[in-house]
Image (cartoon, helix red, strand yellow):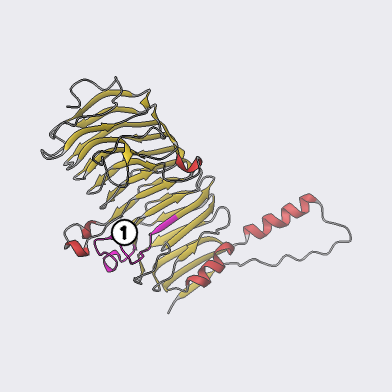
Amino acid sequence: MPAFHTGLMFAAVAAVASAAPTTDNMSAASSNILAKRADCSYTGTINPTNVASAAPGCSSITFNGITVPKGQSLDLSKLTKGTTVTFQGHNTWLAQIGFDDSLLKIGGTDIIVTGAAGARLDGQGAQYWDGLGSNGPTPKPKFLAAHSLLGTSAINNLYLLDTPVQAVSINGCNGLKVNKMTIDNKSGNNLPANKMPHNTDGFDIGASSNIVIDGAIVDNQDDCVAINSGTGITFQNGQCNGGHGISVGSVGHGSSTASNTVSNVQFLTNKITNSSNGIRVKSFVDGKGSIDKVTYKGITLSGITKYGILIEQNYDGGDLPKGVAPGTGVPITGLTIENIIGGNGVVASGTNVAIECANCSGWTWNSVNVTGGKKFSCVGTPSVVPAGTCA
């Protein structure tokens, strides 16, 4: 049976006055009501509809070993300003094949979400994995939709286990900080092809600004992080294992200019291991938009099987399509690639650096050591890329 506890819930405020209340009185009453919001806690099998209804009245919410029923989301997208949310114990979202909503939704202003020591959020991914991910006929749920988190909102120490497809979608956020999140899909690495996880991106970021993701550990089978649009985004001190590396793009796949603009992005001091790609910047061949002032600095690459560094303006759903010339509609300007540590970081069958550009300028390229694989016949390479980098 579910258990639910609240503290003081919206204590009634009664007042009798012969005249209209003053602004000061109204503010005092408002503060009094906010101060008396409840401390809410849940354990066992919950009713997500009831949780969503009660959430705006809670100043703090604790989930300890909850079970979310099949085919339902835990919707915390309308939290009151300043709410804190804590996850304790092992929390499970029971699998419902064909469910395509997000398992967990969080939104609001100055929201603090924390995973207690040892806490797990379990998406039961193996029940969904079929080797097809989002590309198959059966819909699958993303795990965490962090949408419209504003102000000083932060997500600290969450541990997401076995995500059905994409782990974290960050969209419409401003000022969000994500600290020491773990995304753990290691259990899917050695399964038969028709049971493998696919499209298990770590962080997909769009239409957001002033975002910092610090100290993430991502074991997955797709992009560790992919920034599709936004400005002022930093991904630092991360460890990315087994996926597709750290990416900007694909950019240019939408109709609005804002959805196709990436600027002032930093990838700092990250380690990419046993992944198909290390660093990727990609735009659609027929897209419109811009990629400006993106920095990759202090990146360590090892065990890269396809591309150590891949920069392409001819993406068409696949990397470097044969016979497709790069497009000019998404200029890549102000790109900095610096202090890249990848000596013998690419396997012999892989490619160290691949560049296909038609509109690339203003780059900085310093102290880049990516070796072990083959050289690529680059196209439209800016002059700052040293001779000998490409074939």
Q: What is the residue that sits farthest to the right in this orientation?
A: 18
Q: Residue at x 44, y 38 (%)?
A: 288
Residue 124 belongs to the span the image colors magenta: yes
What residue do we see at 46% from left, 75% from top? 3
| Residue 293 location (% of width, % of height) | 41, 29
* Between 153 and 349, the one nearer to me in the picture: 349
Mark 1, other Cα within 10 Å: few <14 / some 14–19 / many ≥20: few
Relative to 133, residue 380 above or below: above
Q: Residue at x 34, y 29 (%)?
A: 358
Q: Residue 336 versus residue 55: which sits nearer the camera?
A: 336
Amino acid type, mark 1: Asn
Q: Residue furthest front?
A: 323
Q: Which residues are magenta?
A: 122-145
Examine the rendered structure and indicate whether residue 47 appears above or below residue 13.
Answer: below
**Main SS category, magenta section:** loop
Which quadrant of the view contains residue 126? bottom left
Residue 76 horizontal side relative to residue 274, left or right: right
Q: Which residue is mark 1?
A: 135
Residue 136 in view in this figure: yes
* Res. 118 visible in picture: no
Q: Quadrant of residue 131?
A: bottom left
Q: Residue furthest bottom?
A: 1
Residue 180, placed above or below residue 159:
above
Q: Quadrant of the N terminus?
A: bottom left
Specify the quadrant of the image occupied by residue 12.
bottom right
Q: Position of residue 22 (x, y in %)?
A: 81, 52
